[in-house]
Image (cartoon, coloured by chain):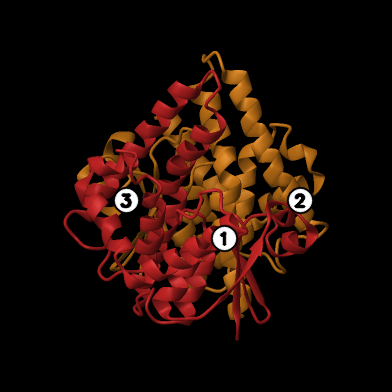
Chain colours: A red, B orange
């Protein structure tokens, strides 16, 4: 059955791989499943056809026959359940992988994404400096805990899993901020993620979309 | 196998049912599983024994024999996989339920939780009103989309599921703010959640902890 995902027609990150379709592309590459991409404009994302698929008017979505999903976390878990390569077979280990998926998106991503938003939207606001610094403190709190837990392991819980895929995706947004680099084991963890062939294929595919849109 | 969860020794919400152990208690009540609660102080949450279970020093955790989990979303999904009553049997419907679980925690909760934090931490800041109003706009954007999708249905996707359990839990934090009440179908949705016998049992159990701590 053909898998179709949606992505930004022109990603606001200029092809840096930070849009949330990247996670789904990466997951599909890890399990070796081909997929098609339907590009949507910002205008189309808020129109009824897209809202029927994604009620909050965002990307990505995932369609496969009768099934339509949204939320990158749920899509990555679904891909991992259908195909080998992203989730452990053992039920307890699989439950722990889902724990790391929620930790990535609900506990670690929150201050990281807020920081990115504040840097775009609030530069002229009276609270900018204070808010940015508070967010960076919150990020450091999370990274200290994560760094302690990871220690010198390659991945968060045994072999690479969908939990690592999402955690690396979330941490990537900090690359070059100086904050990630304060934690050498996390920096190396992110680099291990980026070095995976599946990551590279997914990154090249999303960059090609942005390059084509910019040339057009 | 005995299930043990952790909860605040003295919940900062004063027993209003907003701490994240409430979601796990509610899920266990929905599936009819008994559980034990280990109360932890703020100090204990940051000590090695608890950090081994929950690397970010938060509650709740979930222990069942050899299995240790954290993140309320992952715990609720695990409970739903092990016991009937929280997740549909059909694989596609189950994947959609997980989509709503991630939507609740990653898309809807974020601005709602930020608003609560700002109201506690930033009241004396010169930009308090402006920031609160920006957050309330973000919340309204999500609620407009959610209200449109829910329409006049009882639950988000067919029968009550873990997706509804988490979405109601997240929206409950807005009760009495006036914001939730702008969307009568969402207000009624939350009331349907609160009316469930399993919710009431879970609420009473967490309130009893706070009442006992306050009397002590």
Protein chain holding label 3: B
The residue furthest left is A152
Q: Nearer the viewer, residue A212 or A150?
A: A212
Q: Is residue A76 above or below residue A137?
A: below
In the image, residue B126 above or below residue B60: above
Image mark 2: chain:
B
Q: Residues within 10 Å of mark 3 (few under 14, many from 20)?
A: many
Which residue lies under the disc numbered 2? B147
Q: Label 1's element?
A: loop
Q: Residue at x 70, y 56 (%)?
A: A45
Mark 1 and mark 3 residues within 8 Å of each other at the beta carbon: no
- B167 or A86: nearer the eye? A86
Residue A129 placement (x, y as % from top left):
44, 22
Q: Is residue B213 visible?
A: yes
Asked whether B48 or B15 is in front, the reply is B48
Quadrant (top left, top right, bottom left, bottom right) of the N terminus of chain A: bottom right
Circle 2 packing at 10 Å, graded few (<14), some (14-19), many (20+), is some
Q: Can you give x and y, in whole percent of width and height, for residue A171 in the image?
A: 37, 50
């Amino acid at each position: 059955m053909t898998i179709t995902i949606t992505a930004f027609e022109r990603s606001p990150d200029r092809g840096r791989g930070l849009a949330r379709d990247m996670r789904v592309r990466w997951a599909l590459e890890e399990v070796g499943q081909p997929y098609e991409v339907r590009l949507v404009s910002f205008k189309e994302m808020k129109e009824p056809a897209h809202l029927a698929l994604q009620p909050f008017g965002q990307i990505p979505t995932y369609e496969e026959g009768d099934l339509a999903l949204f939320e990158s976390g749920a899509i990555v878990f679904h891909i991992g359940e259908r195909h080998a390569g992203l989730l452990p077979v053992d039920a307890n280990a699989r439950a722990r992988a889902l724990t790391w998926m929620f930790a990535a998106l609900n506990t670690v991503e929150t201050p990281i994404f807020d920081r990115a938003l504040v840097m775009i939207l609030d530069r002229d606001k009276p609270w900018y400096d204070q808010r940015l610094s508070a967010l960076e403190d919150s990020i450091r709190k999370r990274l200290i805990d994560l760094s302690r837990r990871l220690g010198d392991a390659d991945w968060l819980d045994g072999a690479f899993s969908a939990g690592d895929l999402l955690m690396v995706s979330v941490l990537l947004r900090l690359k070059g901020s100086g904050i990630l680099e304060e934690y050498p084991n996390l920096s190396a963890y992110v680099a291990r993620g980026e070095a995976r062939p599946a990551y590279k294929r997914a990154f090249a595919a999303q960059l090609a979309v942005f390059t084509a849109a910019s040339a057009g």
